[in-house]
Image (cartoon, rainbow, N blue to C red):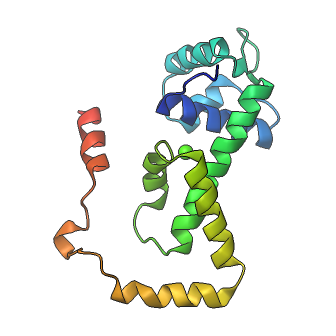
């Protein structure tokens, strides 16, 4: 059975994958810096990921991905990159990185494939992008100035901090 990942586990897996690709090794201290979390939280999470079969972890050693972990991590990093590229292609003008941190945990892999195809479709010919840009001004979206900040995500993350 495929282990179920929480949002936080997905964030860790993505970072662990990126670190192992970039540096060839993964240290808890790097994870803790990149995710801005305490070393003790990293240790706890790494143990969980070890139990779930995603990483191998021994005390005082580097962390390594299992083949399963590498497969997941590769997908999670691709998902993050693709969503960011997608929103930037659309000229999303506010908090792309932050929006993706929310969207990525909810979107299904099949929808990701569709978005990736759409991205390919628009970026493979500049004329298509120009056409898309011309639609921006005549959108039918019922959005006014007062609604620009509307996002439940904002609320959730504010209460989390409090
Ligand atoms: Ca991410």
| Residue 26 place in picture, x, y as percent | 73, 29
Closest to the observer: 109 or 38?
A: 109
What is the quadrant of residue 149 in the picture? bottom left
Describe residue 156's horizontal placement relative to residue 71 as left or right: left
Outermost residue to the left: 146
Q: Which residue is located at x 28 percent, y 33 percent?
A: 160
What is the quadrant of residue 148 in the picture? bottom left
Q: Which residue is located at x 69 percent, y 37 percent?
A: 73
Closest to the observer: 106 or 157?
A: 106
Q: Which residue is located at x 67 percent, y 50 percent?
A: 78
Q: Which residue is located at x 75 percent, y 33 percent?
A: 70
What is the quadrant of residue 54 in the picture? top right
Note whether 128 is above or below 87 in the view shown. Answer: below
| Residue 120 place in picture, x, y as percent | 69, 70
Note whether 8 is above or below 76 in the view shown. Answer: above
Outermost residue to the right: 24
Q: Quadrant of ligand 1?
A: top right
């Amino acid at each position: 059975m495929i282990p179920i990942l929480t949002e936080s586990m997905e964030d860790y897996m993505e970072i662990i994958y990126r670190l192992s690709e970039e540096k060839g090794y993964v240290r808890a201290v790097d994870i803790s810096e990149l995710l801005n979390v305490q070393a003790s939280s990293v240790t706890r999470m790494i143990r969980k990921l070890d139990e779930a079969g995603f990483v191998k972890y021994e005390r005082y050693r580097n962390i390594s991905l299992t083949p399963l972990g590498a497969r997941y991590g590769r997908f999670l990093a691709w998902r993050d990159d693709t969503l960011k590229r997608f929103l930037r292609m659309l000229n999303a003008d506010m908090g792309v990185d932050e929006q993706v941190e929310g969207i990525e945990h909810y979107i299904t892999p099949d929808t990701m494939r569709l978005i990736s195809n759409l991205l390919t479709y628009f970026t493979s010919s500049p004329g298509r992008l120009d056409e898309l840009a011309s639609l921006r001004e005549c959108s039918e979206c019922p959005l006014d100035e007062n609604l620009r900040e509307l996002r439940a995500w904002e609320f959730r993350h504010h209460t989390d901090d409090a």
